[in-house]
Amino acid sequence: MAKIYVSSTFLDLQEHRAQVERVIRRMGHEDVAMEYYVAEDQRPVAKCLADVAACDVYAGIFAWRYGWQPKESNPDNLSITEMEFRQAENNNKPCLIFLLTEDAPWPKKQMDKDTTKIEALRNTASAHHNADYFTTSDELARKVAEAIHKVFAPSDYRIPVWGCLTAASPMPLPDEFRDPLDWIDVTRAMLPDSKGVFALRVRGHSMIDAQVKDGDTVLVKCQRTARDGDLVVVRIRIAPEVFETTLKRFYRKGKYVALQPENPTMVSRSYKPSEVEIQAKVLFVVRNIPDARASRAR
């Protein structure tokens, strides 16, 4: 049974949410939704974001309301709906995106007077993920069921695990002259293109709040660039001929690069760009369970 986090504004999509939650339960999964906190748009931010981080799949449903914007600790004036979406991306969750079609009949009172923010969120979500479109609550429920089925369908790819990611060693790379440590099965719905993707075992506790724990496996793709907030494998020069490999969040801070752990006992550290080499971006995290080959990317 998987945990599916259902994210949307509430009052305008109440019927649609109810249909989606019913179909999730019929499929044998657990729906995690704001109704279990409070039946309105204003809901406890910390609880919502923690539940997104702990879920297996995020389902974002977007019509024409941007939603409630919490006042505290929110300098960018993001809505809780956008916060949940960003949290899902930051935690490398499979994101299922569903957008109300532009020509669907929709009451004006259920639309923002200024749709700039919701349009930007819709555009971002559909640019980052394969979005599907709906007109009615029945159509939405059917499409959600189809998308969830694809996520948990039999695997399409076997991804090799090439080694362990440890601070004292270089990042293990694919090697045609040796056998991988193991294999990870993933579906095409979660990974449309497996070219250049491989897996590494994680050693350490620096990313536990990003749901990456000691013994977990990360699916990565080699690349030399990153956006702020990306979870990346980086090589740090800590002395002229001494290097360290680490898994951290990447941020640009003026003239420096900040590498941020997701562990309250650890601190972010800043480096000159010349001291940091991005080696790969994390695509998914696979939980540490006894039989890794039976696992599903999360």
Image: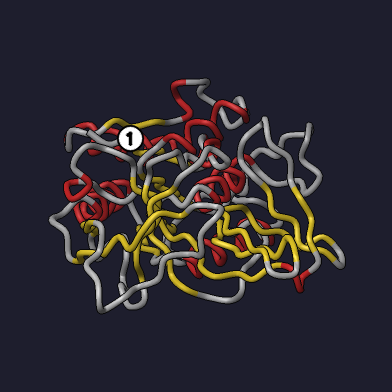
In the rendered view, does 29 fall on the left or right side of 38? left
Q: Which residue is mark 1?
A: 3
Residue positioned 32% across, 40% down in the render? 288
Name which residue type carries label 1.
Lys
Is residue 94 visible from the viewing direction of this image? Answer: no
Q: Residue furthest right?
A: 255
Q: Residue furthest left?
A: 154
Which quadrant of the figure has residue 284?
A: bottom left
Residue positioned 34% across, 66% down in the render? 198
Which quadrant of the figure has residue 104?
A: bottom left
Which quadrant of the figure has residue 15?
A: top left
Q: Position of residue 92 (x, y in %)?
A: 46, 52
Q: Is residue 35 above or below residue 166?
A: above
User: Could you classify mark 1 by the number of other residues whose Cα lies within 10 Å: few (under 14), some (14-19), or many (20 or more)?
Assistant: some
Q: Nearer the viewer, residue 84 or 119?
A: 84
Q: Position of residue 13 (x, y in %)?
A: 45, 41
Q: Nearer the viewer, residue 4 or 91?
A: 91
Secondary element under disc 1, as helix, strand or loop, is strand
Residue positioned 23% across, 38% down in the render? 23
Q: Is residue 231 above or below residue 126?
A: above
Q: Which image quarter holds the N terminus?
A: top left
